[in-house]
Amino acid sequence: MPDLSSNGKTFSENELSAMRREVLAWIERDRQRPKIVAGKPAPSAVKASVPKRPTRPKKKTTTTAAAAAAPPQKSVPRALKLIIPRLPLALPPGRARRATRPPRRPAQTAKRRRRTPLLAVSIFAALVTMLFAVVLVGAYRFGWSNWAVAALARVLPLPAVDADGRVYWLDDYLRDVEMLRRSSVRTGRPQGDGELRRQAFTRFVGQAAIDRLAEQYQVQVGAAAVNAQLQQLIAQSGSRERLEQSVRENFYGWSLDDFSERLVRPYLLELAVRAKLWEDPQAWEAAAVRLKSIHQSLAEGASSFAATASEVNRDDSRAIGGDLGYRGRDDLDVQIFAAAEKISDGEVSPPMRTAQGYVLLLREESVGEGSDLRLRLRVITVTPVDYFEQRLGEILRSMNIHRYAP
């Protein structure tokens, strides 16, 4: 409390005002002073008793006049700092208040955006791989031939048969099976899927064997020969458009190029190989050996001449047991008629080599004499071309064939 005694001195108004302000200030300081409760130390004493940890000296900062004049901001408790960001700005009527996630950091958001497309691509790739696996198992294990297998076979090079490195692709295999199915339905003799697949497989393997045989005989079919054969077919059909339509309907959507490469060329190649056999001494020798065996079987009575002719002959006489009917001297080859004259009715001639191959004759009956002589004959003919089947069988037995599709 300041000393206010005057000792007989008088004060001016200014001095009294100054003393008044000093007294009010002292009262205010006394009111803000903490009260000491018995048994408890004063807060200032507690703070004084706890040693302070050394701290770094703070840098002096200059405070601008505007910052010094700004009113102090009230501090928000930490609990409110955590709650306030989670509160929505506005709630629609009738909905309960619920907490929301705190906003993500920009780095987390960008990382999540990068991860989302990668995850979607991975899931899509897994589904596509699983679909491919199911279709492949169905095609190779269970013999599926539906639209999914056909579509996959057009996209991927899937093998059906491998014959010594010559691959029969699944797409061609399924198309050939469908072509055979349509052909069987059109002829009124529908066949099962297993039989159609067997025919397609046999056809491909046989063609692979013919290709091998053509390589051995050095036989090739050029584009000119294929085109010439195609022009003949166009002339028979009347126009190229009619032939294309016929091929498309009968061969499961083939084009003329497909028809030329997959039917015309193999057909001409087989004819060329068969023609080459007439020049092969081994083919002639094989024909002679076979005819001697047939002659011996007939002599022993193991089979009839007509039945054997129906089995062996490759020409039109096969259907009638080799019957040539009544033939005169001018109706037959000189060599054949001369051999027939040397035997009697009911006898079989010895084997002889002619321009048509090795031949056996049965003279059944004779009419007339001299230049009017007419003989009723039956014939069995074994040609070098028959060696083609034997050589083809030998090649097939030596080939390394893998069948993947049932």
Image (tube, rainbow, N blue to C red):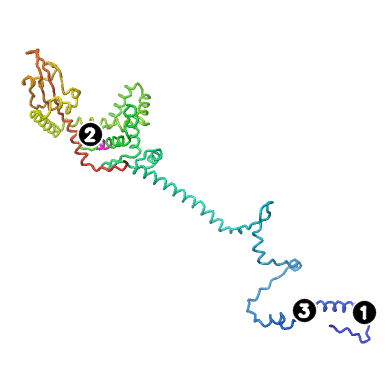
Residue, disc 3 = 33
| Range shown magenta | 204-208
Q: Earlier in the sequence, mark 1 or mark 2?
A: 1
Residue position for label 1: 12
Residue plotted at (66% across, 55% down): 96
Q: Give above or below for 26 relative to 254.
A: below
Q: How far apart are marks 1 and 3 (CA)?
A: 32 Å
* Marks 1,3: beta carbons within 8 A: no
For badge 2, the amino acid type reads Val
Could you tell me the amino acid type at mark 1? Ser
Q: Are marks 1 and 2 in contact (CB under 8 Å)?
A: no
Query: Which structural element holds mark 3?
Result: loop
Instruction: Give the structural element (helix, strand or loop) at label 1.
Output: loop
**Which mark is nearer the camera, 2 or 3?**
3
Vertical position of residue 117 compared to residue 399: above or below: below
In which quadrant will I find the N terminus?
bottom right
In-front residue for pair 323/350: 323
